Image (tube, rainbow, N blue to C red):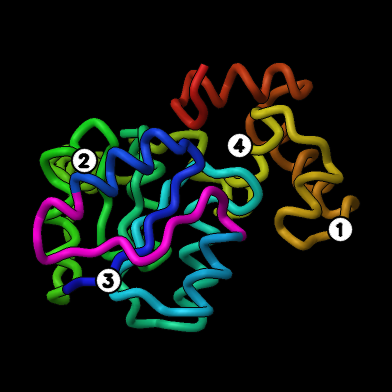
Amino acid sequence: MIKVLLADDHAIVRAGLARIVEESGDIEVVAEASDGREAVRLALKSPPDVAVIDISMPGLDGLEVAAQLLASYPLLPIIILTMHEEEQYVIRAVEAGVMGYVTKRSAPEQLVSAIRKVYGGARYLTEEAVEMLALRLAKGVTGKSPLDSLSTRELQVLRQLALGQTNHEIADAYNISVKTVDTYRSRLLKKLNLRNNAELSRFAIQKHLIEP
């Protein structure tokens, strides 16, 4: 049996995915997490064969969870699960070292195959993700998005600010100082030519970084 850790902050979604996975017959959900910190704790306590991590979770997001898990277990196959089909998420996930990227829209049909494939050592990307990466290569430098100028941490802070998190909450989530969060915020406003958190939120919604 392939032992899987499943992390998603929506209990109904998590239950549905767990049912789909376990109906496969050769995959077992051995741990479930409702936020990023719990996912890290459970995975470090008892490493699964494959970790399926939602990218948008409270506390630590999926990319941060992936970074922490891969720091301890470099060979752990991780699948990022997301509602977003924005190319930035695909690119950041691949850069983070994850082996799979599956949208929640395609998960009922593709998650089982994805788990089997990454468990076997291969990468799994949805057709949409492959097309995005191919388009990105074709566009080259000329088709750059404003998000390309952001570091992964800046992208994470942008999402949290857009979700209404305070500087203190973000600092606690990423184990950084409040002053550092404020520095990231200032950089974001300057790089994106925005004036305040309300505009950051609108920008994040327009770029499909958060749900409206």
Q: Whole-Å distance between the Cαs marked 4 and 2?
A: 23 Å
Label 4: which residue? Answer: 159
Q: Residues within 10 Å of mark 1 (few under 14, many from 20)?
A: some
Q: Amino acid at mark 4?
A: Arg
- Looking at marks 4 and 3 on the same chain, the residue that comes earlier in the sequence is marked by 3
Label 1: which residue? Answer: 177
The image position of residue 178, as x and y in percent, is 88, 51
Q: Whole-Å distance between the Cαs marked 2 and 3?
A: 18 Å
* Disc 4, SS: helix
User: Does the segment drawn in magenta span residue 180?
Assistant: no
- Looking at marks 4 and 1 on the same chain, the residue that comes earlier in the sequence is marked by 4
- Looking at marks 1 and 3 on the same chain, the residue that comes earlier in the sequence is marked by 3
Q: Which mark is residue 3?
A: 3
Looking at the rendered image, the disc whose residue lies closer to the viewer, 1 or 3, is: 3
**Residue placed at 31% from the left, 58% from the top?**
79
The image position of residue 73, as x and y in percent, is 43, 82
Q: Amino acid at mark 1?
A: Ser
Q: Amino acid at mark 2?
A: Ala
The image position of residue 39, as x and y in percent, is 52, 61
Label 2: which residue? Answer: 107
The magenta region covers 21-37
Q: Amino acid at mark 3?
A: Lys
Q: Whole-Å distance between the Cαs marked 2 and 1?
A: 37 Å
Q: Residues within 10 Å of mark 4 (few under 14, many from 20)?
A: many
